[in-house]
Image (tube, helix red, strand yellow):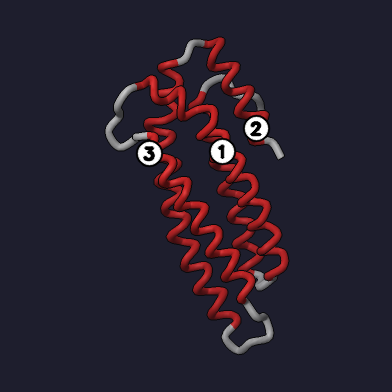
Amino acid sequence: MSPPFSDFASLASLHRELEERFLQHQDALLDLDVALATERLDGYEAALRRHLEAEEALLLPVFARAGRIRGASPDLFTGEHQRLLEFLARFRAELRALEPESAGFKRAVLRLLDAETTFKHLSHHHELREETYFFPALDSVTDEAERRELLGAFTAQVKP
């Protein structure tokens, strides 16, 4: 886990940590290790859920104080959160359906990796939106004491 944060913009490092976890899942897929890929996807999903839930519970209510920001509404963020989780549910189902002994196993893994590319694009755009609008707005509407309190609560909630 990253060190304590001094501002919301520094939370971007958590996005890099989540991205690395997802890539570790994909490494296991490339090795055709379905059990390890599943285990890593489960760990990634648990970490992502904690992150998204903390954003929605702690940060989105404060973000509303920033007023209307084109391309960065709270509904847009929560909608993207929901889509990310829907993708993960689909990936879990596809992992369960993989049959390592079947003739089409490698192609099924390839199809899953292709589908995961779409997920990674959505995730990347979501993270950019947060890093461009969400985090700077939070920094602008909070003073140092509130920022420190929120960052502490956020960090505590996203820890495993």
- Which type of secondary structure does the marked residue at label 2 adopt? helix
Q: Quadrant of the C terminus?
A: top right
Q: Earlier in the sequence, mark 1 or mark 2?
A: 1
28 lies left or right of 128 = right
- Which type of secondary structure does the marked residue at label 3 adopt? helix
The answer to which of 36 and 69 lies nearer the viewer is 69
Q: Amino acid at mark 3?
A: Asp
Quarter of the image for residue 157 reads top right
Q: Residue 91: x and y, percent?
A: 55, 64
Q: Earlier in the sequence, mark 3 or mark 2?
A: 3
Q: Residue 54: x and y, percent?
A: 57, 34
The answer to which of 117 and 98 lies nearer the viewer is 98
User: Which residue shows up at 63% across the image and 57% down it?
Assistant: 41
The answer to which of 4 and 137 lies nearer the viewer is 137
- Name the residue carrying label 3: 75
- Name the residue carrying label 2: 157
- Name the residue carrying label 1: 53
Q: Amino acid at mark 2?
A: Gln
Q: Residue 132: x and y, percent?
A: 38, 33
Q: Quadrant of the N terminus?
A: top right
